[in-house]
Amino acid sequence: MTVKVINYFGVRNLTLLDLVYVHEVDWTANITDFDWSYRVTQTGFDYSKGEVIEIATLRIGRKDNLRHVLNSLRRHNIDIIYSMSINPGYPKYVKVIVKGSIDLSTRFLAQELGLLEIYAYYINGVEHWGFLAFDRESIDQFLKQIANYGKVINASLKALRVEDLITANARDLMFF
């Protein structure tokens, strides 16, 4: 069976931006001296309140480090709406739902510039992002603006075909 992809929107080229970034002004900035990770699994925006909401899984090695991460979120005016340990002992996995302002939100800026977030995870304060872009100008503008809030460690681009997305999922795109 042959499947023909019809491109209704005229999108010929997609670009995957794989970004490694260190924020200098958000909650991740000062928690780099111990082992932790934070994988965002779902996000949304409440435009009426100017808030971004995310669901994530936090992996942490020790109880005092867990407290340090949660306190960093609170100090940066990020509300912890929900948190629940997934497993006993350490390393501990904690499911969290957090809500914060869109003002310094990397994902909100990306969306405003027409980029589509594919993945976001943080390891020891270093942020790893994947975005799909439909034009190079949006990527350039995005990279220019986030440089005001932190340091871009690496930004690599990979050209994709629309057909690549048909069989891929977000996890696959991390390894393109």
Image (tube, rainbow, N blue to C red):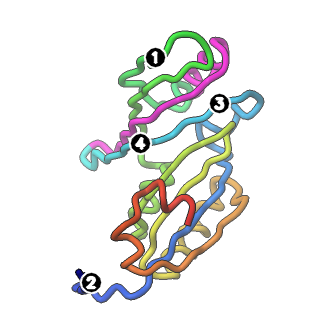
The residue shown at (48%, 59%) is: 172
Instruction: Pinpoint residue 38: horizontal percent, then vertical percent.
Output: 55, 36
- Chain-order first, disc 2 or disc 4: 2
The residue shown at (44%, 35%) is: 56
Q: Residues within 10 Å of mark 2 (few under 14, many from 20)?
A: few
- Chain-order first, disc 1 or disc 4: 4
- Chain-order first, disc 2 or disc 3: 2
Residue corresponding to mark 1: 85
Residue 57 inside the magenta-drawn segment? yes
Where are the magenta residues, as a range?
49-72
Quarter of the view holding residue 86:
top left
Q: How far is disc 4 from disc 3 in space, using C-alphas?
A: 16 Å
The residue shown at (66%, 13%) is: 64
Q: How far is disc 2 from disc 1 in space, using C-alphas?
A: 44 Å
- Chain-order first, disc 4 or disc 3: 3
Q: Which mark is residue 5?
A: 2
- Chain-order first, disc 2 or disc 1: 2
Residue corresponding to mark 4: 41
Q: How far is disc 2 from disc 3 in space, using C-alphas?
A: 42 Å
Quarter of the view holding residue 133:
bottom left
Quarter of the picture holding the N terminus: bottom left
Residue corresponding to mark 3: 36
The residue shown at (60%, 52%) is: 128
Instruction: Pinpoint residue 108: horizontal percent, then vertical percent.
Output: 42, 55
